[in-house]
Each structure stands twice: as structure tokens, then as C-alpha cells.
Amino acid sequence: MFTTRPEIAGTFGVVAGTHWLASQVGMAVLERGGNAFDAAAAAGFVLHVAEPHLNGPGGDAPIIVHDAKARTQHVICGQGVAPEAATIDAFNALDIDFIPATGLLPAVVPGAFDAWCLMLRNWGTWELPDILEYAIGYAANGVPVVPRISAAIENVRPLFEAEWLTSAAVFLPGGNVPAPGSLFARPALAETYARLSCEATGATREARIDTVRRAWYGGFVADAIDRFCRGHAVMDTTGRRHQGLLTAQDLATWSATVETPFAYGYHGHTVLKCGPWSQGPAFLQQLALLRSIDIGATDPVGADFVHTVVEAAKLAFADREAYYGDPDFVTVPMDALLSDAYTAERRKLIGAEASLALRPGGIPGHLAEVDHSAAERAHASHAGSGEPTVSRLGAVGGDTCHVDVIDRHGNMVSATPSGGWLQSSPVIPELGFCLGTRGQMFWLKPGLPNSLAPRKRPRTTLSPSFALREGKPWMAFGTPGGEQQDQWSLIMFLRMVHHRMNIQQAIDAPSFHSEHWPSSFWPRAARPGRLVIEGRYPDAVLQDLLARGHLAEKGEDWSEGRLSAARREGDLMLAGANPRGMQGYAVGR
């Protein structure tokens, strides 16, 4: 099978991710004696600079780690919480039905910085200033601009020039959109990271990292965020200007946490995901539904495979809508949702024809309420607000990054940083970055698992993946893509397990996604039955899917997925990365 690049192999270490600079920085850390956790942290901070349209320091970062020495896996929750002042009543008083996609109102506590620091503190070996050195260098001297950065800035240029002047000062240098291939620097961000490096004092490495964490969450960074949110009313997708709700106290009372992953066994593999504060368990529910279906007998690029996987996804994501939320606030019945008895009944709903219904399952003691008006919003938002309107208000989708690392000791990392992208909210001038907008994923209707509440985590789409094979650590993998993360990652995994594809083959093979259920992003629209397959699929596959009732269409030839992965096979380490977008890369030796 032809692939766009080889699945690389080595015995020393491998790094794969969504940008070549981050991958190479991770490899440089490994070459200098760092471990996988050092390498992933350095790569993560570089991604803030190299992919500002996809993530930033004000965003989020869920991470799954494998500690080779202890032979254990852990989730690091880098998903920040809603401000103390963020109540449903507060938004009702502002006459807001859906938390906006942009501006300061949807900002939650920035979680990415503490997640990277906590991983480095607990499992790394390097000092934090040495980790930050790479990001500081790129922020001070510039990164090569990829075409998608230029396109993202051009999309929101009217908003920046008319309303978000602090963002215009950073992302429109000299009043111009940075050209593809040019060098683009972020001096204020470089100064912020350099100042944080100077805060690293204390008797031990761990103590020095903790002082930097305090400088962020209880020091000058938190103070700057507080002043900006209180002192500026900014335009958002409501078409009005609002101040923020986030305060320094909100940052001071939060920190990243270490959790036990959720796990599910599937054909000799065990897949690990973040908890139901993310959409990650939907991957596990899809595995449960597919476990008794002979996926291996289907053509991995044929209509039977697409139909079966999509119908399973519809059921799993309907349950996501009905039951998932922050388990610190609500009881999420994951044991029941993954049970054999429940799954067997749900599997009966996978028929020969496409379902156009949103069908959550019933769990005794739980109300399975889902939003059936989402399709109407999809029609209204699509018809009523063309691209100029969307750009003017800033509702241009950001996306996500991903990085995977394996080191010579066997340590492994899968991380999916996102949020705080340049389209989300105005730049805070003295820090050089903007806040994230993950709060848009809350519902403002009381009584739902994912209803807004102070100090609560929004049910994020961010979803790193990790798999064991026969009980041994096997693969770290993931992708950007919002709702598509636990579709594209699953498709790759199934093709590797059942069709014996390697990483690069599974990434390069044509893929697909469904938009059947309500989106997690404003305006929370759904498109029941809509299925998009890559243009490389034969027309016969499209016609077959249409005949089954799918509202299927072809996208561009190379448009589905931004996957990367790294795996172990005996003494070998192997890795691959996505060619779509022409910036993902895997490196190693």
C-alpha cells in the first residue's frame, strides 16, 4: 500500500505531532538526555508559538502518560474550570441563551500551563527554564508561518481591526496578515515565558517548578488576566460587548490533577481515555458496540465499514449528549454505559439503513435528555450568517494540536493541547496571549449533566488516546478535530487492529466523519444523517451510502483527520503523522 511517507522506526526514541517544529524540539530534548515527559513538555510549549491558530498558553491540555518504571498509566487533567461568577442566572441576566464562542464570557481557567508543569514535575527530569528555552527562542525570533495561520488571521481580520485592537497589534504587524513562509515573532509572549523562567527558585527541581506554577496562577499572570477581564468589554458572537467573569482568585484556587484513566478491553487491546469530563469515553462506547461485529471482514475503505462505524458513533455520541459531564458535579453512569447488557441492547439498533434519529439509551435513575432542536440551529446559522458575518464576530473555528512521544526507557506520552487560539478572544497585551473559550461547551439549561456551574469543568472534546496490547504499553495516538477526534482516532485504531495496517497506512487511508449529533461548539448545531467522506473514496462507495439513507457527500481528497501516533513493537519504536495540511511530522531514530 502506497503511503505519503514511511512509518519511521527506531530504537532510541520517537516523536510525532501536528507540527514539525514541535516534533523536532521533542526529539532534540531526547537527544540531550531528556525523557519522554521532558520532550512532550518542550514540544507542547513550542506548539503555543508554532500553531497559534490551534492552541495557546490560555488553553487546555489533557494528557495521558505511561510511566515505564512504575508500569502505570495516568491522566493529567489540564481542563480548567468555570469562574466562580459563571452561573446560569448571570447569563440569563445578560439575555444570553448560548454561551458565546468568542470574547471573554466563555473563558475558563487556563489549564494547559499547569498540566505541562505538573507532568514535568512528577515525571520529568529537566528544569522548567530549560524546557521553556525552545518556545522562548521561537517566540522571540519567529516561526515560519504556515498557510493556515495566514488564512485564520485573514478570516478574523475585520474583527481585529474594528474591535480587538490588542489582537491586531500582535497578529497584524504593520497592518498586514503575516505571509505564508515569513517569520512571525511574538515578543510579548517570549517575555512572559522568560519572566516565568526567572521565577524558578527553590531547593529542589520540584520546588522550582512549583514556584513558576504559583507565578502563573497566583502571581503576575493571574493578576494581568484579572485586570483585563474586569477592565475590557469586548465584542463576541452575541453581537454585543461583554466583560469577562474570570478572576485572579479563580486561577489561584485551581490546579491540574492526576486521575485514573477509563479503560475498555477490545480484541487483545485495552484502550485508555480521559473521564467523562471529556468526550473520551465515547471512543470506549464505540468499541463496546463494535466488539461483537466482524469488522475485520469488512473492506477498511468500503461502504460496510463506513456504515457500521458511523451507526455505532451515532449511538455513543447520543449517550455523550445525555450523560457526560464533570463527575465532580454529576453522577455519570459509565459502568452501566459500558456494560455488556446495556451495549447488547444498543447494538441491536445498528441496522442495514442509516438512522436519522438522536437515540440515547435509558439508564435507570438517570434522565436521558438531549437537544432535539440542534438541527434547526444548524439551518438557521448556516443560512443566516455568511462568512463575512461570522468573521466579523469571530466565530471562526479554531482547532487543536497533538503530540506523541516514546523514549528509550519506554515512557510514553499522548497529549492533545488546544484552546486559547488567536480567534478566541483579544490578546492580553502584557502577556502576549489570549484566553480560551471552552466555556461555550456548557449548556445554560439547568439540570443537565453538562449544565454550567461555578468551578465545573466543561465537557471538552479534547481526547488523547493510549492503548495497551496484551497488557503491555503499545500506542500513544490522537488527533485534532473537535467532534471528530473520537471518530478519526477510532477509525485508525480499527484499521490497525483488524486490517493490520501500520500507523502511516491507517493515517493515509481515506477517512470520514459524521455530524449527526449536536456540536459541542457554538451554536451547538446538529446535522442529522450528514456524513462526509474524503474525495478519494470511489463513487460507488458514496452511492452505496446514499442508498442506505446516509446524507453523504464527498469532501476534498485530503481533508479528514490530522492524526499522529507512536507505538512499540518489541525493541522497536514506530511513528507516523498526518500529511493533510502539510505540517504534521514524525521523527526518531
Image (cartoon, grey):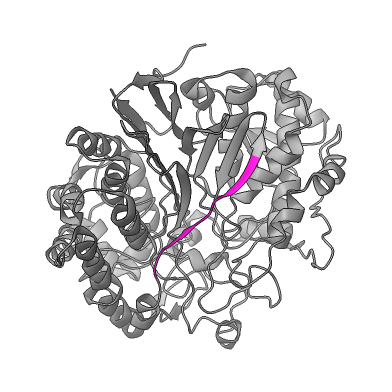
Instruction: Tell me which residue sits at (28%, 42%) in the image.
Output: 39
Instruction: Tell me which residue sits at (34%, 62%) in the image.
Output: 114
Question: Is residue 560 something that shows in the picture?
Answer: no
Magenta stretch: includes residue 262: yes
538 over 127 or under it: above or below = above
Give the camera-side residue of 240 and 21. Answer: 21
Residue placed furthest toward the top:
1
Give the camera-side residue of 288 and 186. Answer: 288
In the image, the segment drawn in magenta is 255-264
Q: Quadrant of residue 187?
A: bottom left
Q: Position of residue 192 (x, y in %)?
A: 18, 64
Give the camera-side residue of 8 and 528. Answer: 8
Instruction: Tell me which residue sits at (60%, 53%) in the image.
Output: 279
Magenta stretch: includes residue 394: no
Q: Position of residue 78 (x, y in %)?
A: 42, 60
How would you classify the magenta stretch by its main secondary structure? Answer: strand
262 to the left or right of 294:
left
Question: Is residue 467 something that shows in the picture?
Answer: yes
425 to the left or right of 24:
right
398 over 301 or under it: above or below = below
Give the camera-side residue of 291 and 435. Answer: 291
345 over 158 or under it: above or below = above
